[in-house]
């Protein structure tokens, strides 16, 4: 589905929509209802994978040359972030419990949205919308 939307409305718009859906999802996990919690986890997952798949495609599209190297560099940072994402939330959990983990997640999503708005598309061979 992310590929479908990414091709029609643009990679950056799909990335941003995925980030916003993910942020809504993680915020819903603060609600005590199990149904709302499950919906929040589902939205976080959908948003994360929509933005990640659109970003992978964007990196390949945006690289004017050395697309393989650009894609590899993106994956290095993707997995580095995943490694930090397994460690940093634990520190916030110790200090602030689940609300601290949610704050870190929303902050990370906000940083991704700012990067999308401020950096994406500069110097790229853009055949993308938005």
Image (cartoon, rainbow, N blue to C red):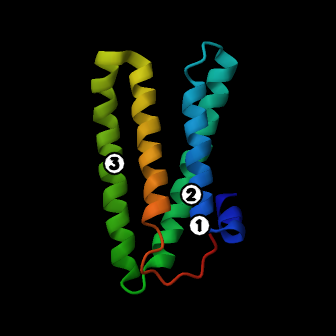
Q: Are marks 1 and 2 in contact (CB under 8 Å)?
A: yes
Q: Nearer the viewer, mark 1 or mark 3?
A: 1
Q: Are marks 1 and 3 in contact (CB under 8 Å)?
A: no
Alpha carbon of mark 1 to alpha carbon of mark 3: how far? Answer: 21 Å
- The residue to which callout 1 is attached is 11
- The residue to which callout 2 is attached is 15
Location of the N terminus (image quadrant): bottom right
Q: Quick one: which residue is furthest to the bottom in this view?
A: 65
- In the image, residue 18 sits, relative to residue 13, either above or below, namely above
Q: Which mark is residue 117?
A: none
Q: Quadrant of residue 76?
A: bottom left
Q: Secondary structure at mark 2?
A: helix
Q: Say few, some or many: other residues with alpha carbon within 10 Å of mark 1 (under 14 / 14 to 19 / 20 or more).
A: many
- In the image, residue 3 sits, relative to residue 81, either above or below, namely below
Residue at 42% in and 85% down: 64
Q: Residue 29's x, y, as percent?
A: 57, 24
Q: Nearer the viewer, residue 115 or 47?
A: 115
Q: Nearer the viewer, residue 19 or 65?
A: 19
Q: Say few, some or many: other residues with alpha carbon within 10 Å of mark 2 (under 14 / 14 to 19 / 20 or more).
A: many
Q: Residue 11's x, y, as percent?
A: 59, 66
Alpha carbon of mark 1 to alpha carbon of mark 2: how far? Answer: 6 Å
In the rendered picture of this protein, how many numbered marks are placed on residues? 3
């Amino acid at each position: 589905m992310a590929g479908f939307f990414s091709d029609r409305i643009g990679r950056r718009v799909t990335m941003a929509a995925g980030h916003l859906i993910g942020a809504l999802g993680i915020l819903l996990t603060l609600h005590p209802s199990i149904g709302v919690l499950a919906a929040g986890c589902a939205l976080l997952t959908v948003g994360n994978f929509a933005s990640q798949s659109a970003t992978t495609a964007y990196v390949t599209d945006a690289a004017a040359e050395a697309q393989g190297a650009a894609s590899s560099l993106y994956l290095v940072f993707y997995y580095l972030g995943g490694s930090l994402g397994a460690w940093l939330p634990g520190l916030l959990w110790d200090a602030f419990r689940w609300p601290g983990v949610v704050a870190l997640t929303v902050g990370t999503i906000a940083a991704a949205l700012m990067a999308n708005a401020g950096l994406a598309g500069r110097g790229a061979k853009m055949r993308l919308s938005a």
